[in-house]
């Protein structure tokens, strides 16, 4: 049997063609991958350069703010970066909402090689201030503690140690310089604690005297101020003529300074020559009141001499402005949101709630001049003293506390050299309800004192898509 043999001529050609096709396909894929990778790397590089340039612009702006003599960084004009052999540009602009204490800056950067690839960052710079805290003490004595019924809504700072008894609640971060004395206690630190460096106090409030002397008002001797919701105030001072002036305008410089004699003897706080302020009422406007000695916040109109005729004020509030009750996060919101009324009280010594005594002798120092709830809307500064109950600061016995004292609510900020007391752990006196006016993170009363060697820092940073 014969079999025919099949011819194999030409069979190699299709194989070669297939190999070439596969090779070419793989080559094209490889080339595409390389090209794509190169493009990706270029885009990545341009993105990185754009972001780096935007950050550089913000860093330069912060550097300019913190210079001893601030320099001006051009806004709205592209600036090449770096100065030598630039590879990128950035442009800065100031956003709505900026104030003297807050700068909101937008920075957009791009690579010179591809200006279409841009990155934009918005940063909020804030100036370090005392009013960024709801409560600030240069010294916390171990004899005065935060107790179970105490609630602090907002950031708290002490330049020494924090002393706790029981289970007080702190809704803001607690910062301290030395230590926490809370072992065996049950405080609730909602936002934690942090050990930090000391912030230096000013030595006096003389710069406020200079502002008042320039375009404000200076009174000599004991001065009583009754704030009125029409933007005016009544002022009683025995060393002026007439003694009582009604509907006085808030000064153009928004600063009042009271001079006079100074001493630590609280028994003669009503002396006509003393550099003391007595203040209460409803503020419409922006005002800082400073004095050479003590400031007393009253529960009644302090321009009336006879206590039997006084009008109850329940402290100091802002006109047509309300603070909400703190929410579950401890935040309180002001209405209207664009409210501008703001008060500063700056004493060279103490700032007190006047709890006993009045001006006329028939009342003397034995009768209560405050009882029940008190509200104070203000940034309070006791440079060489305390904030507290006026009679406790005078080292009077426990019975000098109002009993019952009610609740002392402060919406604002309290800064003091040494922490004072407003009540006792036994329940006598006031229980504290200190709530931060969140506007004071970025704003403060006119010419309010700043920490020595203050500066600007980044408070918030985010990228715009």
Image (cartoon, helix red, strand yellow):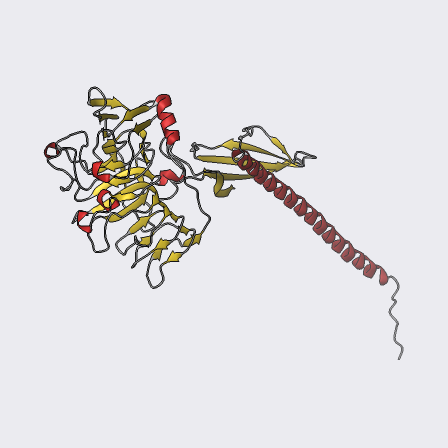
Q: Farthest residue toward the top? A: 241
Quadrant including the N terminus: bottom right
Compared across the picture, whether 224 is left or right of 344 comes to left
Residue 136: x %, y % from top left: 36, 45
Using the image as rendered, state which of residue 108 and residue 317 is in the foreground: 317
Q: Give me the residue at 15% from left, 30% from top.
A: 305
Q: Is residue 118 visible?
A: no
Q: Quadrant of residue 227?
A: top left
Residue 455: x %, y % from top left: 48, 38
Using the image as rendered, state which of residue 290 and residue 81 is in the foreground: 290
Q: Quadrant of residue 241?
A: top left
Q: Give me the residue at 32% from left, 29% from top.
A: 286
Q: Give me the residue at 53% from left, 40% from top.
A: 121
Say if 252 sits above or below 58 in the image.
above
Compared across the picture, whether 371 is left or right of 173 comes to left
Residue 176: x %, y % from top left: 41, 51
Q: Farthest residue toward the bottom? A: 1
Q: Is residue 37 visible?
A: yes
Residue 160: x %, y % from top left: 40, 51
Using the image as rendered, state which of residue 356 and residue 380 is in the foreground: 356
Say if 456 sits above or below 272 in the image.
below
């Amino acid at each position: 049997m014969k079999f025919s043999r099949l011819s194999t001529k030409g069979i190699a050609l299709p194989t070669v063609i297939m190999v070439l096709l596969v090779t070419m396909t793989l080559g094209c894929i490889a080339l595409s991958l390389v090209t794509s990778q190169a493009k990706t790397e270029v885009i990545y590089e341009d993105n990185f350069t754009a972001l780096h340039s935007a950050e550089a612009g913000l860093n330069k702006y912060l550097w300019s703010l913190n210079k001893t003599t601030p320099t001006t960084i051009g806004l709205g004009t592209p600036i090449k970066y770096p100065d030598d052999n630039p590879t990128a540009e950035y442009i800065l602009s100031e956003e709505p909402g900026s104030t003297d204490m807050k700068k909101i800056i937008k920075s957009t950067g791009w690579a010179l090689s591809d200006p279409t690839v841009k990155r934009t960052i918005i940063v909020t710079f804030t100036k370090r201030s005392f009013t960024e805290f709801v409560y600030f003490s240069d010294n916390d004595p171990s004899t005065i503690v935060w107790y179970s019924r105490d609630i602090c809504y907002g950031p708290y700072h002490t330049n020494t140690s924090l002393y706790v008894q029981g289970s007080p609640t702190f809704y803001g971060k607690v910062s301290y310089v030395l230590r926490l004395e809370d072992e065996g206690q049950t405080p609730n630190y909602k936002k934690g604690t942090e050990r930090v460096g000391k912030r230096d106090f000013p030595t006096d409030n003389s710069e406020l005297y200079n502002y008042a002397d320039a375009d404000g008002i200076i009174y000599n001797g004991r001065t009583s101020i009754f704030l009125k919701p029409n933007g005016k105030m009544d002022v009683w001072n025995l060393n002026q003529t007439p003694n009582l002036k009604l509907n006085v305008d808030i000064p153009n410089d928004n600063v009042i300074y009271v001079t006079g004699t100074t001493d630590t003897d609280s028994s003669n706080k009503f002396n006509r020559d003393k550099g003391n302020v007595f203040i209460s009422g409803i503020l419409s406007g922006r005002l800082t009141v400073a004095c050479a000695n003590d400031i007393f916040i009253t529960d009644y109109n302090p321009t009336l001499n006879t206590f039997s005729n006084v009008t109850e004020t329940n402290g100091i509030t802002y006109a047509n402005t309300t603070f909400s009750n703190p929410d579950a996060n401890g935040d309180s919101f002001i209405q209207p949101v664009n409210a501008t009324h703001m008060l500063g009280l700056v004493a060279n010594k103490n700032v007190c709630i006047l709890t006993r005594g009045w001006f006329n002798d028939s009342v003397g120092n034995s009768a209560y001049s405050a009882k029940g709830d008190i509200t104070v809307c203000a940034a309070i500064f006791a440079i060489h003293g305390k904030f507290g109950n006026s009679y406790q600061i005078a080292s009077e016995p426990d019975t000098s506390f109002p009993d019952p004292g009610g609740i002392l609510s402060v919406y604002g900020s309290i800064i003091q050299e040494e922490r004072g007391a407003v009540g006792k752990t036994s329940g006598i006196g006031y229980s504290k309800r200190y709530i931060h006016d969140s506007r004071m993170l970025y704003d403060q009363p006119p010419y309010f004192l700043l920490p020595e060697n203050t500066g600007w820092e980044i408070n918030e940073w985010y990228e715009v898509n």
